Image (tube, rainbow, N blue to C red):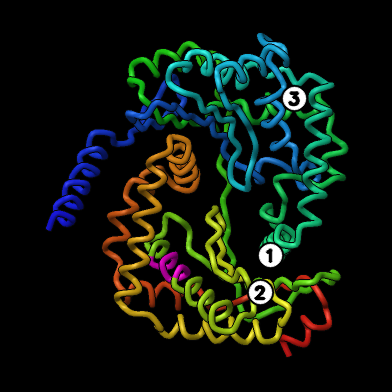
Amino acid sequence: MKRYLLATLLSIGFCQLFAQHQTFSFDVNGLKVIFRPTQKETISMRMYYRGGVTNYAPQQSGMENLALSTAATCGTKNYTVQDYHELADEYGIEIEGGSKKDFGTIGMDCIRKYFDQGWKLFTDAIVNPAFDPAEFQNEKEKAISSVFARQSNPESRIDQMSASVMFHGSPYDIDPLGTDKTLSGFTADSVKNYYHEILLNKNRMFLVVAGNITKEALEKKITAAFGTLKAKPYTPAVYEQKPLEGERLFTEHRPLATNYLSCVLNAPVLSSPDYYPFALGINALSSMLYYEVRTKQGLSYAPGATVEVQQIPYASMYVSTTQPKKAFQAMVSVYKRVLSGGYGQEFLDGMKKNYRNQYYKHQESSSLIVDDLGEAEALGGYELLENKIETISKIKLQDMHVALNKYLRGAVWVYLGDEQLGKAAFQ
């Protein structure tokens, strides 16, 4: 009885907490601001730049990521590189930048006590980045090293292969982190021009903030810091999702002790009513793969399934194994079982609970709150995150079954490892 009473009180406490700290948005001179008030001692914020890989041509891949990482770490017009880093270290301020498929960011995290110092560095990095040639060269070399590291890592490589197969010929085929060839051709001036001419445009920017600060104080700071931002014409890209049909196999030979196998599948967008029923279904697929492939048959140490949430999303199931044929057969068996509804209400209730726990865990971190709100806004609206728990609580078994069978109608198999074993597995 005491345990039940404690759980009830905690539940009421959570409800009251979130009722008092609802996310809302407002406009400051044309710049959209999404704000979650909190009582935490940390303040987090990200300036988002819309567009991602649709902002540039394939031969410019990596430019946006390099521009934002350089802007965030290589000094500003008002702070030398040394002063910039010394101040950040002294006050425990973390500032970083980068770009993904759908958006780029410059972000800052600090404790509330040193927010004024963090705000000065953060806003100057956005408005007045220096793009010092020497510092830029260091940042570029780190980016190139990262490219080679990802190519040599089998798990990263099969992810690249999956995306390339899924989006061949479209902007989504572009790697936002670039290639060694594209990165080598960039100069400090070319990246600086890209940042100022393309990214620094409040029509494509929005700011997300979570922390213990009033709206009035935040609005005043934003007005002072970003009042000179220019508004240029910006038309969001139109994304065309072409559903996969049939089955195809792509292989890449590499002498590895363990072979990597991924199956790329269709998926709904985050703003679709089908998304959460589908995502819960993919969770079911992941759990059943783990049990069948690892626990029961011992064919892989890390099988699973996931949804890549982006403007053109996709799902995938994957294994790493020394026995590709047996692993492939097990994956197909589990896949068919999930499509036929091989799970019950107890299983669905458990997955809902896991989603709730993950959501509330993210609410403990200002940084994760900002990341989740920013991604949701870029993919359809921050309200999608705010309504997540309510939406998931209403999902029924039939909703999952319908969503899975609606989207899982085609597949692309991607294999990395011993090519002979791989081709034999699919015969």
Q: Mark 3 — residue?
A: 192
Amino acid tagged 3:
Lys
Label 3, secondary structure: give it: helix
Amino acid tagged 2:
Val
Residue 406, image x, y percentages: 45, 75
Amino acid tagged 1:
Ser
The residue that appears at 51% across and 77% down in the rendered structure is 291
Q: Mark 1 — residue?
A: 162
Label 1, secondary structure: give it: helix
Cα distance in 3D space between marks 1 and 3: 32 Å
Residue 159, image x, y percentages: 68, 61
Would you say residue 282 sits in the magenta stretch? Answer: yes
Vertical position of residue 290 compared to residue 426: above or below: above
The residue that appears at 60% across and 27% down in the rendered structure is 95
Cα distance in 3D space between marks 2 and 1: 8 Å
34 horizontally vs 146: left or right: left
The residue that appears at 36% across and 21% down in the rendered structure is 213
**Neighbours of disc 1 within 10 Å: few (<14), some (14-19), many (20+):** many
Residue at the front extreme of this rendering: 2
**Camera sees residue 364:** yes
Vertical position of residue 47 compared to residue 129: above or below: below
